[in-house]
Image (spheres, rainbow, N blue to C red):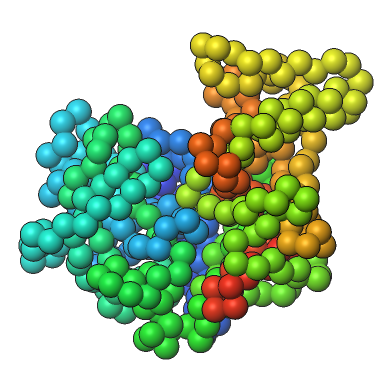
């Protein structure tokens, strides 16, 4: 039985299916509308729409993980204090003829870990019929929902081995796409918003989308002059930086915002909120930040919405200190940018979106 979708979700679904119809003729590059938005009680994330065995799912597009993972209905419906799959906007998967959940693997996603088992089904991306794919079903989570929301995840990191090969590896193996390359872009959000539409391209890129040239950085982007590797992880919501650079960035943002506003903009630490907060009236004056990657010739400019947040009239700088001196750029890095991942060449192409 198909699920009855809320009006807002039906509208998003309509956009996704129309896009799929328009793009059916593109052959070896599968194109899928994506949207950074909010579902259920989780924060905003980058979502795509797909169908497995005629069951509709919204999946987080995650360049930091490799597996396609779905919420198992039999498990989620039994989790105490949750709304159940019938009310879960992102959807759950039910095995048409029952599941064998005896095998167990553990995946870790940020602050939670999940127990999964291998399964297979027939996949559609929008109206692009893909065919049979292997994926993982979640049968437990620590900490459990609702303390940490459960989610469906479309992992795009390269992985072609074991029980859970990436969707890209499976598409390539089945000759559904001619290349392991994939590209992602998001438009700039409207003022005061953290939501935006974009596109996921599987099997190649599209030079008509970006301002040339497309500049490349090697395996693991490298921050010039800082001497640190950088990961672009679309499954993450916050910019993560070593503590000393986080504090430097906050001070520089404060200085540049004050110059743009022509008055003192104060960004101060709130010990109760445990974040650097500022008056939301000055959000329009926050500057862009440009990271120089590779040997110093690949700029990546991020929109103020990529490093700030607002909830109920509280604004803060969404830069989290890392525990291991790592740099991680979140999904919001895509605002106004085109990124083309070429795992077969161990590089990422970066350009401004037209």
Left or right: 5 with respect to 96? right
Taking 24 as reference, is 141 above or below it? above
Q: Is residue 221 visible?
A: yes
User: Front-most of 323 and 48?
Assistant: 323
The answer to whether residue 83 shows anywhere in this view is no
Q: Which residue is depicted at the point 60% across and 46% down? A: 327
Work out whether 314 lies above or below 59: above
Q: Position of residue 90 (x, y in %)?
A: 34, 48
Foreground residue among 153 and 73: 153
List x then y, in percent, for residue 281: 74, 19
229 up-or-down from 67: above or below? above
Q: Nearer the viewer, residue 194 or 119?
A: 119
- Which quarter shows the N terminus? bottom left
| Residue at x-position 8% and y-position 59% | 102
Q: Where does the image place residue 210, in percent across and percent down from the top left?
A: 75, 66
Q: Is residue 7 left or right of residue 121?
A: right
Residue at the image point whose x is 40% and y is 43% from the top: 110
Quadrant showing the C terminus: bottom right
Q: Nearer the viewer, residue 86 or 64?
A: 64
Which residue is drawn at the image coordinates 40% and 63% (left, top)? Answer: 66
Numbered circles on residues, count: 0
């Amino acid at each position: 039985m198909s699920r009855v979708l809320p009006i807002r979700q039906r509208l998003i679904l309509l956009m996704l299916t129309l896009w799929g119809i328009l793009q059916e003729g593109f052959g070896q590059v599968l194109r899928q509308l994506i949207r950074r938005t909010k579902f259920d009680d989780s924060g905003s994330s980058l979502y795509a729409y797909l169908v497995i065995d005629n069951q509709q799912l919204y999946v987080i597009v995650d360049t930091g993980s490799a597996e396609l993972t779905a919420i198992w209905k039999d498990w989620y419906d039994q989790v105490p204090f949750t709304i159940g799959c019938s009310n879960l906007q992102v959807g759950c998967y039910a095995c048409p003829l029952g599941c064998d959940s005896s095998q167990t693997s553990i995946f870790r996603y940020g602050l939670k870990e999940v127990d999964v088992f291998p399964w297979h089904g027939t996949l559609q991306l929008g109206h692009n019929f893909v065919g049979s794919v292997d994926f993982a079903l979640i049968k437990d989570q620590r900490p459990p929902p609702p303390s940490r929301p459960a989610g469906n995840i479309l992992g795009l990191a390269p992985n072609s081995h074991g029980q859970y090969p990436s969707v890209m590896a499976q598409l390539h193996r089945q000759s559904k796409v001619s290349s392991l390359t994939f590209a992602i872009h998001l438009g700039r959000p409207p003022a005061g918003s953290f939501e935006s539409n974009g596109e996921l391209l599987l099997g190649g890129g599209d030079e008509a989308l970006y301002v040339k040239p497309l500049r490349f950085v090697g395996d693991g982007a490298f921050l010039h002059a800082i001497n640190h590797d950088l990961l672009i992880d679309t499954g993450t919501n916050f910019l993560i930086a070593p503590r000393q650079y986080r504090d430097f960035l906050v001070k520089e943002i404060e200085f540049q915002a004050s110059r743009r506003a022509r008055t003192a903009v104060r960004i101060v630490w709130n010990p109760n909120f445990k974040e650097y907060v500022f008056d939301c009236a000055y959000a329009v004056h926050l500057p862009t930040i440009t990271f120089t990657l590779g040997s110093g010739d690949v700029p990546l400019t991020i929109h103020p919405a990529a490093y700030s947040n607002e909830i109920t009239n509280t604004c803060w700088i969404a830069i989290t200190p890392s525990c291991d001196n790592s740099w991680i750029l979140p999904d919001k890095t895509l605002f106004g940018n085109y990124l083309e991942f070429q795992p077969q060449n161990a590089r990422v192409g970066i350009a401004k979106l037209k």
